[in-house]
Amino acid sequence: MPSIRIDDLAIEVNPGETILQAARRAGIEIPTLCYLEGFEAGASCMVCAVKLKHNGQFIPACGSRAIDGMEIEHDTPEVRDTRRMALELLFSDHLGDCLSPCERICPAHLGIPAVLKHMRAGEVGLAAASARRDLPLAGILCRICHRPCEHGCRRGVHDESVAIADLVVHAIDTEWSAGEARLPTLAPDRQEKVAIIGSGFTGLSAAWFLRQQGYKCTVIERNPAVADTIRAAYSDLSAALLDDEVDLLERAGVKFRTSTEIDRESTLDALLTEFDAILLATGATTHDQAAALGLACEGKKPVSDKHSMMSSRQGVFIAGRAVRSNCQPVVSVADGKAAAVCIHQFLTGQPLSRPAKPFSVFMGKVVDAEMDDFLQQTSSAGRGIHFDSEQAIEESKRCVHCNCAKADVCKLRQLAIDYDVNLHRFSSGERMRFQRNVEHPLVRFEAGKCIRCGNCIKVAGDHQEALGLTFIGRGFDVHIGVPFHESMRDGLLEAARAAVAACPTGALTLRETYNCSGVSMTDADCS
């Protein structure tokens, strides 16, 4: 039987089979973007490039037949460089944010678009749950936060930013008023135990995220009550609300030890015999206090590796104001979240690395004509301040949907992360005009995210659309459109959902289900 070799692995091939098909059958994953199973390969993106050993030529695996005796390189630095270049060329004229500016600028990376989507649908409980998953003490934090998310809100370029923090507070308060707040999904309990010294924003944040991973967490506080430092710093906060938030942590399985001082090396040693990892989240820590615990110092602060967040002692981590001279509460929460990631890596034997900022393309400042496209299907109401249920829905509809609805499943974004692309390598410094087409009742089309793979054209043809979609123009001006200058509504009468599913980026997405500006979309999916 004919065979080929991929990175020295012999693979038998079937007649007419492509290199990609043979590789996948053998369990070798070659990346693709323009390839669509069941259709003729377009071989346009070259992300699936492989190298022929005998002549050094790079060919697309999706459109190249496997020929008996072929020897192919797939997973080598040179092949990866070629694929990276192909991706970077695609990004040279890619336009549209992966993450919305509000989420990207939030130090804790709260999933704000998801919260607002639930609010628009009137799903206040789900909005609260979504906020709590990413943000411990959400009802407290969004009351006192300096609100960088709202400073970054693109709606503010037009009139006023969306009242993001107030909407989160409304969702949380409504949830408390309706009864018991729901917990995020918790992983099965693990055997490892973590001690967290300090019950400020950093310590409680770390406990919240470690419990979601299933770790047994004990928060140790020197004061008689949990979160005493928060109560002292924000005396106008409702004591009952803070108590409710602490109770929620206890419901999640976090244990508390109060009136317990950890101020000597011997007490830290004792904890290390009881726990598998320790986080110091004690607030501002002096040189003498750190030295008393047996920790190395630099200047006035204890040493903390900037990548692993670990101190000079194995298994002892430091975060928050213990190593920062000053930080806002939301930054402390972000530090606690990052420390939880590093502790999880330590306890599972992984390399230690503080999580990097989420990957995102950022289109930057928009001009008035572009803002008009963003404002389509949004509420024209002014910013609200205090909300009832209907007002909260109206406020959430002021969101201009900067985020990519497919960010979590976008193949281009995932490959950019996997191949560590340089977004600006082939950038000319100028960008195209942002455009958003919402003339179809189900589909939103953003041309700047299109990589011209042709998948939507193939799917429309397969559904025997009367008009369908086609490539229009030539060279660098080629774009997807409907023949005879007809609308997207006319081009996708039957194949709308299939075209969205076939699109490897966020160029084609399904629209939301709410009724806004008199347009009802009762048949649409949530984006």
Image (cartoon, rainbow, N blue to C red):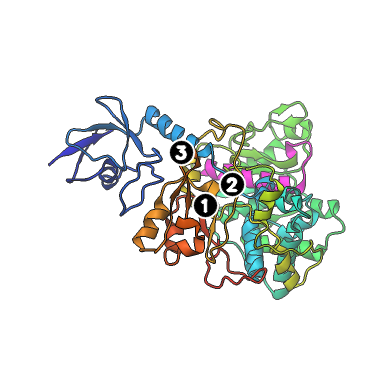
Nearer the N terminus, badge 1 or badge 2?
2
Residue contact between numbered discs 1 and 3, judged by CB atoms under 8 Å: no
Note whether 269 is above or below 176 in the view shown. above
Task: Count residues near mark 2 (Cα–Cα under 10 Å), then give few for <14, some for 14-19, many for 20+.
Answer: many
Q: CA distance from mark 3 to mark 2?
A: 22 Å
Where residue 295 appears, as percent x and y from the top left, is 68, 32
Q: Which residues are magenta?
A: 322-347
Q: Tell me the residue that label 2 is attached to.
A: 96
Note whether 385 is above or below 454 in the view shown. below
Left or right: residue 97 versus residue 480 is right
Residue 105 falls within the magenta-colored stretch? no
Amino acid type at circle 2 is Gly
Residue contact between numbered discs 1 and 2, judged by CB atoms under 8 Å: yes
Q: Which mark is residue 475?
A: 3
Mark 2 lies on a secondary structure that is loop
The residue that appears at 63% across and 55% down in the rendered structure is 111
Q: How many marks?
A: 3
Give the quarter of the figure containing the C terminus. Answer: bottom right
Q: Tell me the residue that label 1 is attached to.
A: 506
Q: CA distance from mark 1 to mark 3?
A: 22 Å
